[in-house]
Image: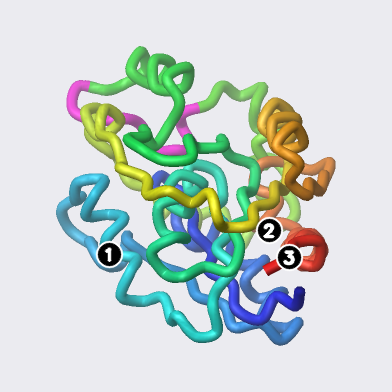
Amino acid sequence: MELSHVVLVTGPFVGRSSMLDTAEALRAAGALVTEPDPHAAHPDALPSLDDWALSMLPVVPRDPAPVVVGYSAGTVLAAWLAPQVGASALILMDGEIPAEKGPCPILPERVTSLLKGRTGPEALPRWSDWWPDDMAEPLGLGPLARLRPDLVEVLRGEERQFPTGWLDQRLDLPDRSGIPTAYLRLSHFYDHAAREAEKFGWPVEHIDGSHLHPAIMGTETAGALMALAGRLEF
């Protein structure tokens, strides 16, 4: 099916610039692109995870029925959003595959436990500071600096320091079993999720890039999303 309306959902730890290049490429291809921005909806105090998710609902047009794309930690938010906006399909991109329904953390326990060991006196570090230097290339921080230096400060400026306790919250996911779903793997960090998606019988596309590929290579990322949409029946 044609990708006529797409909703791009980022994780809360980065901002819309992490998918800006992909959004522009999708618009250039003729799609209506909606980019919920809870950061803008909550510019001062950070809300609860529930309120973060709820702030996406008013900005998503229901017609035409959207394909919801969840990226990184945004896969959880997208899985929550898709059934509530009448999504025609769901595409999960370089993130964990959330449970089909029920309470779900924004990050898996293996990541949460790592981050809690690195937390400051009051809050988690900003996303760019979560990682050791040797992860700069596969994450995409190195390629971003070389290929899109204009976005480095923009991306960092959107990152916020979240209270450590924010990671302990759960988002109650509605049942999404009737929504056609696909998976786009961008980096080796999510090889396990791509294998899981294949076991489910979902369409899966692979890009040998970095986690920040949507910010760096938007045309290629948009092309893969359109290819996946074309493989789904909705």
Crowdedness of circle 2 by 10 Å Cα count: few (<14), some, many (20+)? some
Earlier residue among tags 3 and 1: 1
Measured in 3D between alpha carbons, the distance from the residue under mark 2 to the one under mark 1, in whole angstroms, is 30 Å
In the shown orientation, is residue 160 left or right of residue 95?
left
Q: Which of the image's four quarters has the C terminus?
A: bottom right
**What residue lies at 40% left-to-right and 52% top-to-bottom?**
80
Q: Which of the image's four quarters has the N terminus?
A: bottom right
Q: Is residue 126 magenta?
A: yes
- Residue beneath label 3, please? 233
Query: What residue span does the magenta drawing correspond to?
Result: 121-130
Q: Residue 55: which numbered mark, if any?
A: 1
Q: Nearer the viewer, mark 2 or mark 1?
A: 1
- Residue beneath label 2, please? 148
Q: Nearer the viewer, mark 2 or mark 3?
A: 3
Q: Main secondary structure of the magenta part?
A: loop
Q: Is residue 226 above or below residue 127?
A: below
Q: Is residue 51 above or below residue 65?
A: above
Q: Quadrant of residue 134?
A: top right
Q: Are marks 2 and 3 in contact (CB under 8 Å)?
A: no
For this rendering, which residue is in front, 26 or 129?
26
